[in-house]
Amino acid sequence: MQPKTKRIPWYLALLIDLVLCGIGLCLFAYFHHVRILWNIGMPDEPEIVVPVPRPPSFPSDTDTDVFLSTDLTDDTHVTDTNVTDTDASDSVSQTDTVSTDTVTDADTTTETEPPFVENLGQFGAKFPDRFAKTAADVISTADRYVSRDLDITYTKLVYTGEKIPVNYHVLDIYVRNLENFFTVASLTSRRYFTDMVAATGCVIAISGDYCGNTNAAYEVLRNGVEMRSSNYIIHDLCVLGYDGKLSVFTEDNYDRNKVMALNPYQIWNFGPILVENGKNKTNFSKNRDIAGLNPRVAIGEIEPGHYIFIVVEGQYPKGIKLSALAKIMKNMGCVTAYNLDGGASAHGYFNGTILRNGHPDDDTPRKLYDIVCIGEVAQ
Amino acid sequence: MKRFFDILTEVLMHLSFVEALIVLVLFVTDRFNHAMGFMTADISKWLIFALCATVILLFICLMVRFYRKDH
């Protein structure tokens, strides 16, 4: 007769299995959140890709050459603004210091024929009355900012469509050049929103799409530099082309070749799409997990060069639903609008003011991977 | 050889249970926060692959065991 094998009790075996499962989950969390192990198309840690912004400068009215602006057309992308960091007062001579490989014919304009400043730049001719023509036209107040390259109107509104009214901030933005619309992003390190804003000196900032998310199906492209690539996506995708147009893709119609054909300047991968072809979305069944009441951040395009940013305050049960946000964006006149990372990530900033009052995490805000900025950049 | 198959079967049995439990937890978590990509991250795909491999090996071991019993 064979000796009977001694077995451990079934409950002990089950307990060991559960402990092993716990260890497995911890390991998963470590490699999923902290240390990314496999293949998400990450090049050598592109840290922050951003032109160096500089406050606007306005010399005397006679020095009109200072308004020379890089003409960003489809064929002339400024991907690397290697501008010498000289004092703003030297800006008259700065057309010589701009990296010549990216600048168009604008730097050959002669001093004898001062250009019509209001028509310069990518969208200057489109919005001739929007931007400051002289130092006297510059405005920088709590609700308005006008400079050589920017025209921003800030409005604080209250949404009363839910049981608890909630504040939301609307930023109506005109830019002279697309380079005034830039991002700060890192795939590997998170920083406080306020630190990133301070580092850029931008006029407007909102939270981005949390691009360091380890989700493999992410396409991340910032300021013309592709930081992560994916042949498939699981969230709606938004492309800002060098022509200033916002385009959106769903996971069903996503085609990486089509996206790249749009000549992308920025790509966000969060969503969902709020407004497409001037029609607001009403069905967010695919986004049930984020469709409820939440603080929100969204971007929208009225026309190339004219954008709307919205920051909604709150935290459950305060906030607004995606459907309501889509309606607001449509009513603002957006042809295309797209939701960015909200919830505890929702941050906003305008001209010295943080647009995020009353959030429970205000004392210890969430660190972010990226922000979207509107600001002055060196010409 | 028989003893080896017995031990292997037992190990694979527990391993498949542990892996299945982890996948189940990730599946449920993914329902609540789709944006984090708990089911679409590469590490998750490898985990599902490991679960499949373990279950197939377990199937082979059990087949061998049953075959021996029958004959």
Image (cartoon, coloured by chain):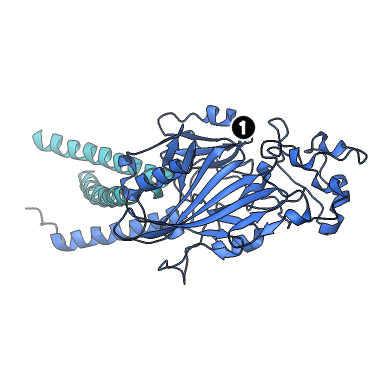
The cyan chain is B
Q: Position of residue A122 (x, y in %)?
A: 70, 37
Image quadrant assignment for residue A280:
top left
Amino acid under disc 1: Asn
Colour representing chain A: blue
Does residue A372 appear to the left or right of A147 in the view shown?
left
**Side (left or right) of A235 relative to B3:** right
**Viewer-side residue, A22 vs B2:** A22
Q: Callout 1: residue from which chain?
A: A
Q: Is A126 rendered above or below residue A9?
A: above
Q: Position of residue B33 (x, y in %)?
A: 34, 51
Residue B59, x across and y down, in percent: 22, 38
Measured as percent of width and height from the top left, residue B31 is found at 29, 48
Label 1 sits on a secondary structure element that is: loop
Above or below A198: residue A225: above
Q: Give the residue at x 27% y 50%.
A: B28
Q: Residue at x 76, y 51 (%)?
A: A378
**What residue sits right under mark 1 in the picture?**
A263
Q: Is residue B24 above or below residue A22?
A: above
